[in-house]
Image: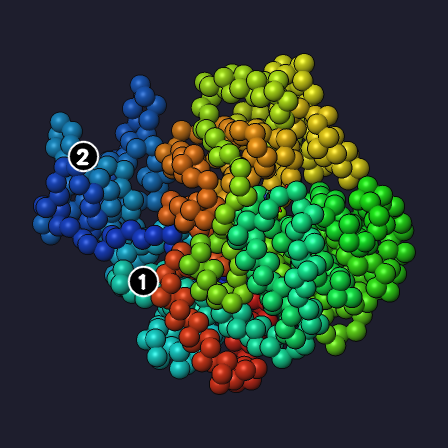
Amino acid sequence: MTFSTPIGQVPRIGTAYEKKLKKTGITTVRDLLFHFPRTYEDFSKITPIKDLKEGGTYCISGKLLDLKEIRTFKKRMSLITGLVEDASGAVKVLWFNQPYLIDSLKPKDEMYLAGKVLRDKAGIYLSNPIHEKLKEDMEDASLTHLGRIVPVYPETEGMSSRWLRSIIKMVLAQMKEVPETLPEEILHEKKFLPVRQALWQIHFPDSLAEANRATSRFAFEELFYILLFILSERKKIAQVKAPIIPFSAELMKRFTDKLPFHLTDDQKKAAWHILKDMEKPRPMNRLLQGDVGSGKTVVAAMAMLSAVKAGYQAALLAPTEILAQQHHKTVAQVLTPFKITIGLLTGKTDRFISPKLPSDYIEISRSKLLEKVKDNKLQVLIGTHSLIQDKVKFGNLALVVVDEQHRFGVKQRARLLRSATLIPHLLSMTATPIPRTLAMTLYGDLDLSLIIQLPAGRKQIITKIIPPANRPKAYEAIREEIAKGRQAFVICPRIERTEKTPKDTEVKTVREEYEKLSKEVFPDLRVEMLHGKMTTKEKERAMRRFKAGKIDVLVSTSVVEVGVDIPNAAIMMVEGADRFGLAQLHQFRGRVGRAEHQSYCFLFTESNSHTVRARLKALEASTSGFELAERDLAIRGPGDFAGTKQWGLPDFAMHQLTNLELVEQARESAKALLEKDISLKNYPLLREKLADFREKLHLE
Ligand code: ADP
Ligand code: MG
């Protein structure tokens, strides 16, 4: 058995479990061994039976005697009783509703048991304990579930921690050799456990301190790869040339004078950084981070204008078709006064804007469009990922702007070019609030611009959690707003019911909500749908009509998540709010409040769970994406955070991201190693890891 052995080939994992494991993303032995415990339960302390006290939870060890099954006919319950005896005394044990135990337990069995001690008329007893039999050929130390510190795995459907424990233990025992991925000198210097030992200690620790030691090794390792990667990417970039784009204050002034608003100070600062970067002969690699609605697009437009006026081309990549179209329109609006040709290339549509008016676009064939791109006749190309295809070659590309999601490396940038002598500058934009301190550590001051201020005149969005009983009131509020001329979004977690979502589960779907709202709640209003199963034409039409104010209520899936700009929309209703992460909800909320109107965000939830409410309350209390990032981190850890996922970090390492000291250490180690061996010639495993990592981030 090796790390790459498929999970299906592991003994004792049948097809049913194989499926379940795959659903949680575990496909190889490595994935299984790196499925780390969420927490531990300490059953290492064995209490003598004579010391048991009512109300406490204990782990005991002894011999099972007097096993009996009693059926209580009135309650139709199975009851198994027994007596457990150790050197100090004996105690009664009761198992409820586990009739199968009568076959697996045998009198005289030596076993460990753990459970709560309760009292009935006859005295104290151990209630419904978990147990583990001691097999004769086993040492105490090889207990799996009791008599030790026991791993508790993240909750997964149909896979108990007990089952995972046995499987992981068996696999660990069979893995004779585990390749060490960290360089010897780092292991030594940091006093980390070697990988095999660390895997044992993280799953079956001798003590919590050892578990922590193992965890920090793996967390360090993940961070180390990221930093190794970021730093080597940076070194690569420092060795290639980029087009020099002269900064023209006059041009920028003409641009900002034409805007219907004043730039915020943060926007000015970000633009300044970007324009200064592009003056250098090295490719820019800058992250522009700004909350939803903070006005990143206009900053990007300034960079694109600069590039184009210097004789080059610029490309803008959007995560979705709708956003690509929106960018196409808004960028056209601000750039056409400068007589710039702007094209749109998505999976389905190809458009081209003539240099006169934003509305004056013509649809041309894909091949014609690509020809213009190649011949430098098209100055700005906006699109979805279809823009990254091999067929798309730019004649003279100098700037790539990436809006959310796409990750771009040097190679990907080079691929866009017809001739790869120069590498274009890169500006990535994101509303994903990676905690600031962390972003600073990973990117450094040099390559990170933040827009924290929102444009002036924005009203605070009023956010409210709506319990089921207040639904009619919320509908009333929506009706009032619409009467004032506003528009509303209704977001549902699903498009429609499938066989997998039975009728009785409380998941709201676009189709059902649409039916309900259009027929029962707002029969007099214009209600329409938008979701991923509609054709591009249908989606576009819905968006167009909504933008034009021809729809009052748009029932939609999360397709409107990022970036869609409808200034007149003032209400965001989210159904099943508990099914979305805080970051995503914050993104939804960012769809409203983009103009001077008072806006509202209503979060509907049927859940009474305390954590759910705490999470949603955070949203009520704060409108800052950064603050919410920190809070989600505190409430449920960063694993669920929509945006941080794209870093490709496993959950346990995400938790370590708040540990800035560890991040700093990883950075130092990565730097030192690269200085010694830039191409990692002497570290083939590390090189391999890095390649994996690159692939994971879709960089090559
Ligand atoms: P995001 O950062 O979320 O991408 P956008 O670039 O879509 O935000 O901008 C949101 C809205 O704010 C747009 O309608 C844009 O025209 C407007 N906007 C941008 N900057 C300013 C500003 N300084 N003052 C007023 N409105 C602005
Ligand atoms: Mg945007």
Is label 1 in contact with label 2 (beta carbons under 8 Å)?
Answer: no
Instruction: Give the left or right position of residue 612, taking residue 294 as reference.
Output: left
Vertical relation: 531 (above or below) 88 = above
Q: Which residue is mark 1?
A: 212
Determine if residue 653 is in view: yes
Task: Give the residue at x 42% y 59%.
Answer: 437
Seen from the viewer's position, the closer of residues 146 and 61 is: 146
Q: In 3D space, how far apart are the residues under numbered discs 1 and 2 (Cα atoms)?
A: 34 Å
Q: Secondary structure at mark 2?
A: strand
Residue that mark 2 sits on: 118
Residue at horizontal 82%, vertical 67%?
395
User: Which-is-in-front pick, marks 1 and 2?
Assistant: 1
Q: Earlier in the sequence, mark 1 or mark 2?
A: 2
Disc 1 residue type?
Answer: Asn
The C terminus lies in quadrant: bottom right
In front of the other: 313 or 636: 313
Instruction: Looking at the picture, tell me which residue is in the foreground, 310 or 665.
Output: 310
Kind of residue sitting beneath label 2: Leu
Q: Position of residue 640 (x, y in %)?
A: 48, 47
